[in-house]
């Protein structure tokens, strides 16, 4: 328990320092508050996006999806058409966004309905989850890009 307790304390202290850093900077504080408006965007996703995606709110949604690695890319050749796959991008952000999307499909009524609709339409669950990740990213991008954009819950 000694080593586990030590690591838990270190993690709490790191989280506190990250939050303190965001709170001290007016721009980061404003952006963090705006990102947290989306139900499912918690402190970990917010801090990750602020740290690893400075382009958020300044580039178009399709480019942002490719940058993070949640845009489907074709692997076609001649008449052969294969399934689209996501790849590349900023892995650390993608992993955190994945966990946020899992939580959002349980707690955000709009994203849960979107996920359920895709699965009911025959999309595999992992594909539907990536679609939720992409939608979350697009909404978060729009929140920062447009100060007048209002989420409807």
Image: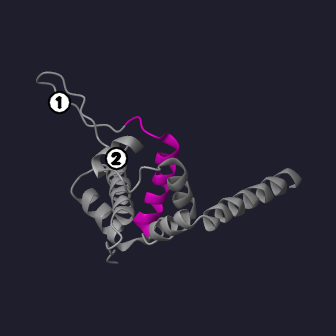
The reply, left or right, for residue 6 in relation to residue 124 is right
Q: CA distance from mark 2 to mark 1?
A: 22 Å
Determine whether the residue tagged by mark 1 lies in a helix, strand or loop. loop
Residue furthest bottom in the image = 153
Which mark sits nearer the N-terminus, 2 or 1? 2
Which residue lies under the disc numbered 1? 81
Where's the N terminus, which quadrant?
A: bottom right
Task: Point out the stretch of residues depicted in magenta.
Answer: 87-106
At horizontal 29% and vertical 51% (from top left) the residue drawn is 60
Tell me the quarter of the picture where residue 2 sits.
Answer: bottom right
Q: Is residue 42 visible?
A: no
Q: Is residue 136 visible?
A: yes
**Residue 100 is inside the magenta segment:** yes
- Looking at the picture, tell me which residue is in the foreground, 124 or 30: 30
At horizontal 50% and vertical 54% (from top left) the residue drawn is 49
In the rendered image, residue 27, in percent from the top left (x then y), is placed at 52, 64
Question: Vertically, is 28 above or below 149?
Answer: above
Which residue lies under the disc numbered 2? 65
Question: Vertically, is 1 above or below 71?
Answer: below
Determine whether the residue tagged by mark 2 lies in a helix, strand or loop. helix
Rate crowding at label 1 as few (under 14), some (14 to 19) or many (20 or more) other CA atoms within 10 Å. Answer: few
């Amino acid at each position: 328990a000694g080593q586990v307790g030590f690591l838990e304390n270190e993690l709490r202290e790191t989280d506190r320092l990250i939050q303190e850093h965001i709170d001290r900077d007016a721009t980061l504080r404003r952006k963090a508050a705006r990102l947290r408006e989306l139900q499912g965007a918690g402190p970990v996703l917010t801090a990750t996006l602020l740290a690893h995606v400075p382009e958020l709110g300044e580039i178009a949604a399709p480019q942002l999806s490719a940058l993070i690695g949640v845009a489907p890319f074709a692997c076609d050749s001649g008449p052969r058409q294969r399934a689209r796959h996501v790849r590349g991008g900023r892995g650390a952000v993608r992993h955190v966004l994945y966990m946020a999307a899992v939580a959002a499909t349980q707690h955000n009524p709009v994203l849960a309905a979107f996920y359920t609709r895709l699965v009911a339409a025959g999309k595999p669950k992992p594909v539907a989850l990536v679609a939720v990740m992409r939608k979350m990213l697009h909404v978060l991008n729009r929140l920062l890009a447009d100060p007048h954009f209002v989420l409807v819950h």
